[in-house]
Image (cartoon, coloured by chain):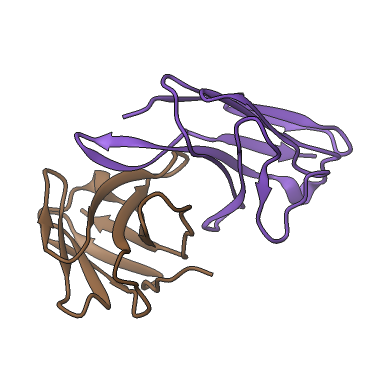
Amino acid sequence: SAVISQKPSRDICQRGTSLTIQCQVDSQVTMMFWYRQQPGQSLTLIATANQGSEATYESGFVIDKFPISRPNLTFSTLTVSNMSPEDSSIYLCSVLGAISGITYGYTFGSGTRLTVV
Amino acid sequence: DAKTTQPTSMDCAEGRAANLPCNHSTISGNEYVYWYRQIHSQGPQYIIHGLKNNETNEMASLIITEDRKSSTLILPHATLRDTAVYYCIVTSGTYKYIFGTGTRLKVLA
């Protein structure tokens, strides 16, 4: 299955600042997504990162707050802008590809744990 | 919204089978049932998936009812390392995953 590297693994940031999270995949993938997981909650889809075009955002998420780049088929970034304590969450990258033998599905990165103070 | 409903939490004795149910009454004919689990502070990990037949792999078994409106994930001999949140996801395969609340399984020594 695809191996995903997310950086940073964790960070503590001051409110009002921005953080860019990187997602690097060891193979070319077509579909790439960004999720948020608030403390004690399930995963919520933020957006689909589209290669060569603007990301597709889910309801409740906007580009000004969560700008996403995807310059090629192996890399994407998510920026959390103008952060507030409510942005404290785990942010996860996910890609579509082979996950077990010929099984096709989504692989997830280990996540970026963000704390905003 | 998620297409699945699961119990919020379950306990299981170590060494016993853990049976985790999932309801997906609005599942479409081309949609699969995927199961993932998330161990604390890690990304979700794939366990198993199926369309309409029962499936088994080295990790678990998946039983899907004949009408496909519900399924059960079976961990045959639960260990303490199986303590995690288990997510049942209904998807057409390449479509985005929408997560429900999941079941928090606690395996007791």
**Position of residue A101 measured from the top left corner of the image (x, y, whole percent):** 19, 34
Residue at the (12%, 56%) spot, across then down: B55
Q: Quadrant of residue A2?
A: top left
Residue at x 30% of width, y 56% of height: B34
Residue A19 x/y as whole percent:
75, 30
Residue plotted at (34% across, 73% down): B27
- Judging depth in this view, the residue of B89 and B81 nearest the camera is B89
> Does residue B31 appear anywhere in the picture?
yes
Q: Is residue A83 left or right of residue A37?
A: right
> Which chain does the brown colour mark?
B
Please indicate whether residue A82 sits to the left or right of residue A96 in the image. Answer: right
Q: Nearer the viewer, residue B78 or B69?
A: B69
Q: Is residue A23 visible?
A: no
Residue A39 position, x and y percent, is 60, 52
Left or right of B27? Residue A49 is right
Looking at the image, the residue that sits furthest to the right is A16
> Can you tell which quarter of the image residue B89 is in?
bottom left
Which quarter shows the N terminus of chain B? bottom right
Question: Is B76 positioned to the left or the right of B84 in the image?
Answer: left
Which hue belongs to chain A? purple
Q: Relative to residue B100, is residue A8 depicted above or below?
A: above
Name of the residue lying farthest toward the top:
A26
Question: At x 32% / y 60%, what residue is drawn?
Answer: B105
Tell me: residue A26, above or below residue B16: above
